Amino acid sequence: MTVDCPDELVKELDGYVKEGWAVNSGAAVVEALRRFLESHRPDVIQNQIQADVEWGLKGND
């Protein structure tokens, strides 16, 4: 897979790799993609919307 990315993001990502937060930039991108996909699954989003609606109708306070 090839990804076009703004230079500033590449520079920031390279900094994280140099600091040891990821083995390499590819590993960091894969981890970011995994986290994005996990947090944007339809069932997760549906549950978040449902909780917001419940809060709006009944509140927690």
Image (spheres, rainbow, N blue to C red):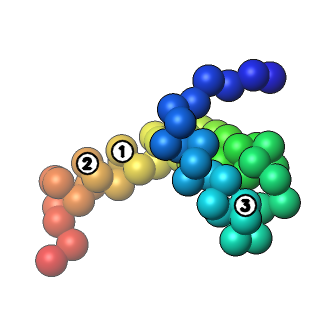
Name the residue located 51 percent from the left edge and 32 percent from the top edge: 6
- The image shows residue 19, relative to residue 2, as above or below, that is below
Query: Would you call the spot at circle 3 few (<14 residues within 10 Å), some (14-19), or many (20 or more)?
Result: some
Question: Residue 57 location in percent, x, y?
Answer: 16, 53
Q: Which residue is mark 3?
A: 17
Q: Which mark is residue 36?
A: none
User: Is 37 in front, or is 10?
Assistant: 10
Q: Which quadrant of the structure image shows residue 34?
A: top right
Q: Which residue is mark 1?
A: 49
Give, as a three-letter code, the residue at label 1: Ile
Asked if the residues shown at circle 2 and circle 1 are in contact, with their CB atoms under 8 angstroms apart, the answer is yes
Question: Residue 18 location in percent, x, y?
Answer: 73, 65
Q: Secondary structure at mark 2?
A: helix
Question: Residue 48 location in percent, x, y?
Answer: 41, 50
Q: Which residue is mark 2?
A: 53
Is any atom of residue 36 visible in this view? no
Query: Would you call the spot at circle 1 few (<14 residues within 10 Å), some (14-19), or many (20 or more)?
Result: few
Task: Tell me how many marks there are.
Answer: 3
Q: CA distance from mark 3 to mark 2?
A: 40 Å
User: Is 24 in front, or is 35?
Assistant: 24
Q: Secondary structure at mark 3?
A: helix
Name the residue located 26 percent from the left edge and 48 percent from the top edge: 53
Residue farthest to the bottom, as pictured: 61
Give, as a three-letter code, the residue at label 3: Val
Question: Residue 22 location in percent, x, y?
Answer: 77, 62
User: Is 58 in front, or is 28?
Assistant: 28
